[in-house]
Image (cartoon, helix red, strand yellow):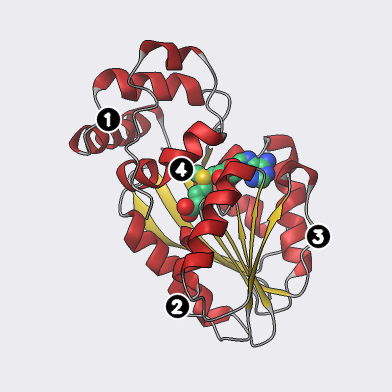
């Protein structure tokens, strides 16, 4: 993993502008993920094992919002060798990082990277598995339903969609507690209060989380027959949805 230290929000200037996924962020993103996403490595492993349960020989497994390729690298361990891994992201600096990492590994299955804006929807070819880890929250709410419906329509019966999101607590007290414990986690990972506050401000209006129940409804109302939560840590939630 590229371990350049994430100090993006150390200096006061950074809080003043919106968060983006450009070159500066991509350079430190692996460190940011590891120190900002609780149980990040375990989560990737759980996603990859579930992907392995559903991937069918000769099909494609998509990682939408693949960033620097960690999900693809982990999934490759559990997929049949005939499955093609496809990573999609809007950010070319993220895709450059992903390409460098994937080329360095001897990947057991074919793979490719596609640059695309998921706000526009995406035509998926022959998918059996679609993964979206901490990315739907960055898609404009107006387009989320269309994207999820498109994913469900592209999957065959028995295909799966693995969705991990930051979520809101059910009421304001619960939400406050979840956020408090999340910020405590970030302090334990070495972020100071100013960095935490500046990043929160930079993400406002960029990362728009739903409640877990809203995400469930989004899945069940748009083509998935069943869904369940496989991971929950305060305001982080992983859901497995199956097309019937
Ligand atoms: C939090 S990161 C995802 C982390 C990654 N899935 C992982 O498991 O390590 C969100 C990613 O979504 C991408 N993204 C944000 N908005 C997007 C859009 N509209 N279309 C495509 N990708 C987008 C960003 O460039 C970024 O790489």
Tell me which residue sits at (56%, 54%) in the image.
66
Circle 1 sits in a helix, a strand or a loop, which is it? helix
Label 3 residue near ligand 1, CB within 8 Å: no
Q: Secondary structure at mark 3?
A: loop
Name the mark nearer the viewer: 1 or 2.
2
Q: Of 163 and 222, which appears nearest the observer?
A: 163
Query: Whole-percent x and y of residue 196?
Result: 33, 25
- Residue occupied by mark 3: 123
> Which residue is at a point 63% across and 81% down the rendered structure image?
83
Number of residues whose C-alpha sits closer than 10 Å to that of mark 2, classed few (under 14), some (14–19) or many (20 or more): some
Which residue appears farthest toward the left when viewing the image? 188
Residue at screen point 35% across, 44% down: 31
Compare marks 3 and 1 and give the one earlier in the sequence.
3
Question: In which quadrant of the rendered image does the C terminus lie?
Answer: bottom right
Ligand 1 lies under 8 Å from the Cβ of mark 1: no
Q: Alpha carbon of mark 4 to alpha carbon of mark 3: how far?
A: 25 Å
Ligand 1 sits in quadrant: top right
Q: How much space separates mark 2 and mark 4, taking CA atoms?
A: 26 Å
In the image, is the residue at mark 4 within 8 Å of ligand 1 by its beta carbon?
no
User: Would you place residue 33 above or below residue 229 in this image?
Assistant: above
Provide the residue designation for mark 2: 77
Q: CA gap, disc 1 to disc 2?
A: 35 Å
Q: Position of residue 20 (x, y in %)?
A: 56, 30
Q: Nearer the viewer, residue 228 or 6?
A: 6
Front-most of residues 179 and 103: 103
* Viewer-side residue, 118 vs 91: 91
Q: Which residue is mark 1?
A: 180
Q: Is residue 94 left or right of residue 47?
A: right
Q: Is residue 116 among the parts visible in the rendering?
A: yes
The spot of residue 239 in percent (x, y) is: 50, 59
């Amino acid at each position: 993993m590229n371990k350049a230290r994430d100090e993006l929000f150390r200096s006061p200037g950074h809080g003043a502008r919106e968060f983006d996924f450009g070159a500066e962020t991509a350079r430190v993103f692996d460190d940011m993920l590891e120190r900002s996403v609780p149980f990040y490595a375990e989560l990737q492993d759980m996603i990859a094992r579930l992907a392995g349960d559903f991937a069918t020989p000769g099909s494609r497994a998509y990682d939408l919002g693949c960033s620097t390729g960690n999900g693809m690298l982990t999934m490759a361990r559990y997929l049949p060798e005939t499955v093609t891994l496809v990573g999609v992201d809007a950010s070319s600096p993220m895709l450059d990082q992903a390409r460098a990492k994937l080329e360095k590994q001897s990947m057991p299955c074919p793979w490719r990277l596609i640059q695309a804006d998921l706000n526009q929807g995406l035509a998926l070819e022959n998918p059996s598995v679609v993964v979206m880890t901490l990315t739907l929250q960055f898609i404009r709410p107006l387009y989320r339903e269309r994207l999820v419906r498109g994913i469900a329509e592209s999957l065959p019966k028995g295909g799966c969609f693995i969705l991990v999101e930051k979520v809101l607590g059910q009421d304001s007290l619960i939400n406050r507690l979840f956020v408090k414990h999340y910020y405590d986690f970030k302090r334990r990972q070495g972020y100071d209060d100013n960095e935490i506050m500046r990043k929160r401000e930079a993400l406002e209006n960029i990362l728009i989380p739903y409640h877990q129940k809203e995400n469930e409804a989004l899945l069940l109302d748009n083509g998935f027959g069943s869904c369940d939560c496989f991971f929950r840590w305060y305001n982080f939630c992983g859901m497995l949805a199956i097309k019937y």
